[in-house]
Image (cartoon, rainbow, N blue to C red):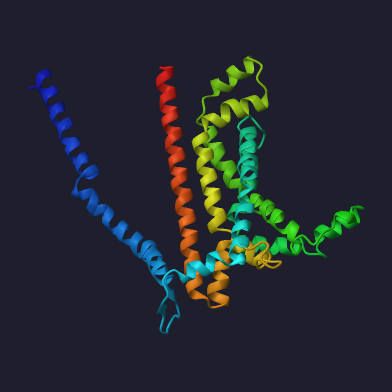
């Protein structure tokens, strides 16, 4: 005996009603909170608890293993009145000047590789190779290459350009630009891969229509490619800015030890120096809190920018419709 059309329709309706109950329970009910609880506890234990402890210790003349006297905000006062701290902050913002280069260079190469370039996959792999290498190892190699009597200066002298030979890592005027270029080289491939993935989602007919209208390479780049993937561009910029504050330590430590003087030191390197070398534990804790606030502010600002860009895109789509 076969089921009637009405019975089959009723069975489908029953199955459709059963599915949302299960999915809705996982999406917003107690089950979701139960699944998130272990991750939240782990995050609190690994990340937030140490940060709160450091913030607490920054209010003390911290002596690990001994008596620590409560001194309020004296560590912060000493920090903000120390010229060395402001020199390090100035170095940090000098590295930020490399941000346009770190964003535009991989973006241009990714845009070039989106065309039918022979061996595009090979080039992406070559560009990405430095990203999988340890920064400490790479920095050791470049420290040898860029030393006063290293291969770079030897090559310049051999080809008659001895006037360009330079103590690249021991000159206050040259050391920060050199580090900016090395960090560009190290992160270049990651940027190319991210932008290549973003560009692959841009409809090809936009570029074809632009070519029919006589738009050149740079016109396509600035007026089609960049606006189409601006969310990816902003996210890469945020990642690079946070990297400047968090991931420069290995480069600075291996290449220059912050020198000459403090001319290449970053905040994370200065924290290491205060804590591990000089034993100013309270000051190091205060500087850690300041660094954390810098990063939180940058992340929050980036989130606002991404949200505003999303609203603009939604409005543009509604207007086009």
Residue at point 47%, 73% (across, down): 282
Name, please, the residue furthest toward the right: 160
Front position in the image: 32 or 284: 284
The answer to whether residue 4 is seen in the rendering is: no
Q: Is residue 163 left or right of residue 301?
A: right
Rendered location of residue 257, percent (x, y):
66, 68
Residue 318, image x, y percentages:
39, 21
Q: Is residue 269 above or below residue 276?
A: above
Q: What residue do we see at 39% from left, 67% from top?
A: 50
Q: Is residue 210 above or below residue 299?
A: above
Q: Nearer the viewer, residue 180 or 153?
A: 180
Residue 210 appears at what percent x and percent y? 60, 19
Image coordinates of residue 255 in percent, x first then y, are 68, 64
Query: What's the residue at 45%, 38% (across, down)?
Result: 306
Q: Nearer the viewer, residue 319 or 173?
A: 173
Relative depth, front residue between 6 and 189: 189
Q: Quadrant of the N terminus?
A: top left
The quarter holding residue 273 reads bottom right
Whether residue 49 is visible here, answered yes or no, is yes
Q: Residue at x 62, y 25 (%)?
A: 220
Query: For the C terminus, which image quadrant?
Result: top left
Quadrant in which residue 27 is drawn:
top left
Q: Of all residues shown, which one is farthest toward the left?
A: 1
Q: Is residue 17 left or right of residue 108?
A: left
How many marks are shown on the rendered structure? 0
């Amino acid at each position: 005996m076969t089921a009637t059309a009405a019975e089959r329709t009723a069975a489908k309706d029953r199955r459709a009603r059963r599915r949302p109950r299960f999915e809705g329970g996982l999406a917003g009910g107690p089950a979701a909170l139960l699944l998130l609880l272990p991750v939240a506890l782990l995050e609190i234990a690994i990340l937030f608890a140490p940060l709160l402890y450091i913030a607490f210790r920054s209010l003390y003349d911290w002596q690990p293993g001994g008596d620590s006297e409560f001194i309020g905000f004296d560590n912060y006062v000493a920090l903000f009145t120390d010229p060395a701290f402001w020199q390090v902050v100035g170095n940090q913002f000098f590295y930020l000047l490399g941000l346009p280069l770190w964003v535009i260079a991989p973006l241009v190469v990714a845009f070039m590789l989106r065309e039918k370039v022979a061996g595009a996959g090979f080039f992406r792999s070559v560009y990405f190779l430095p990203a999988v290498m340890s920064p400490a190892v790479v920095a050791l190699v470049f420290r040898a290459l860029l030393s006063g009597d290293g291969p770079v200066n030897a090559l310049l002298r051999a080809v008659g350009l001895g006037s360009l030979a330079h103590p690249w890592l021991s000159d206050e005027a040259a050391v920060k630009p050199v580090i900016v270029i090395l960090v560009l080289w190290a992160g270049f491939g990651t940027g190319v891969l991210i932008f290549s993935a973003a560009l692959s989602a841009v409809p090809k007919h936009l570029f074809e229509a632009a070519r029919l209208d006589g738009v050149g390479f740079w016109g396509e780049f600035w007026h089609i490619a960049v606006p189409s993937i601006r969310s990816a561009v902003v996210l890469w910029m945020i990642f690079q800015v946070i990297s400047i504050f968090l991931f420069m330590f290995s480069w600075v430590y291996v290449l220059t030890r912050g020198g000459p003087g403090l001319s290449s030191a970053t905040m994370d390197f200065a924290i290491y120096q205060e804590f591990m070398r000089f034993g100013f534990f309270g000051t190091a804790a205060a500087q850690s809190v300041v660094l954390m606030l810098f990063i939180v502010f940058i992340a929050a600002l980036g989130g606002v920018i991404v949200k505003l860009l999303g609203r603009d895109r939604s409005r543009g789509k509604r207007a086009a419709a």
